[in-house]
Amino acid sequence: MENEMRALDISEDDIATMFMAIYWAINTSTRKAAFWLLTYILHAPSLIEVIREETKAAFKDDGNINLEHLHNQCPQLNAMWNETIRMSSYAASVRFITEDTIIGGKVLRKGNRLMIPFRQLHFDRGVFGETADSFDHERFLKKATLTQSNNWRPFGGGNTMCPGRHMAKRSVLLFVAMLFHRFDVEMDGYQPIPAAEEGKPVLGIMSIKGTDDLRVRLTTRKAKA
């Protein structure tokens, strides 16, 4: 990748910036989204076989994996992804105030910045139903148009929408599919869903709170004859 950039005569500073963006994405929202998706699945273990059945056609005999199958032919896994980021996203839009403005009786002074969190939109019962506060793996199957709603803002919106959202999704779907394809996975005894750090807005997916965690047991699956 670096050699390709240098061949295009991209400067050293720009190459460093691009790599930093990749490493930042891997170490923030992507890994946290994978954690939350795995957590929700393990708390409804019947979903594991659903995922295995739906994704098995993506695994080729030569060891390659068809990413397009995971992205386009696995509606249940994709619905679980959408529900996971609905529950765990804490995205916010930040705008620079260019003129004194009054909104709802509040004075917004020129030169300040306005942070607008989107999380509240994801729990609007008028849009997501009476179960909006809980994880429902079928929510986006029952109503696929939810992803077109103005209340759906897991990656922000407008010209500041997260440019890495597609890479993050594909990475997490691949991780989950490979994990359940290669291993039997279960919680190490019953554990409640870890608490999320809701008091700290972040640029993407929330972290777990304090020392909360989820311990799991992995057992290599035997290859079928």
Image (cartoon, helix red, strand yellow):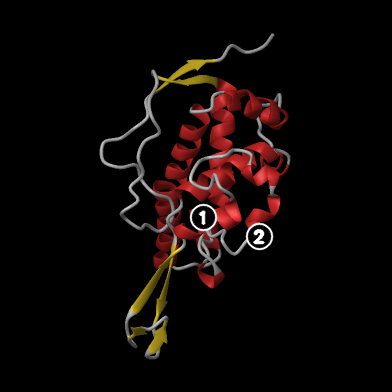
Q: Which residue is mark 1?
A: 122
> Residue drawn 53% across and 60% down?
153
For label 2, the crowd category at 10 Å Cα-Cα, with few meaning under 14, some 14 to 19 and many 20 or more, is few
Q: Nearer the viewer, residue 78 or 166?
A: 78
Give how far across and how far down residue 216 sits, in percent: 41, 23
| Label 1: which secondary element | helix
Q: Nearer the viewer, residue 124 or 217?
A: 124
Give how far across and how far down residue 150 sits, in percent: 59, 64
Give how far across and how far down residue 18 sits, in percent: 45, 60
Q: Does residue 147 sit above or below 97 in this rendering?
A: above
> Residue drawn 42% across and 55% down?
90
The answer to whether residue 59 shows anywhere in this view is no
Residue 63's label in the rendered image is none
Q: Amino acid at mark 2?
A: Gln
Q: Earlier in the sequence, mark 2 or mark 1?
A: 1
The answer to whether residue 22 shows anywhere in this view is yes
> Residue drawn 40% across and 60% down?
16
Residue 148's label in the rendered image is 2
Q: Quadrant of residue 115?
A: bottom left
Q: Amino acid at mark 1?
A: His
* Distance between mark 2 and mark 1 Cα atoms: 13 Å
Give how far across and how far down residue 35 sits, in percent: 44, 37
> Residue drawn 40% across and 57% down?
20
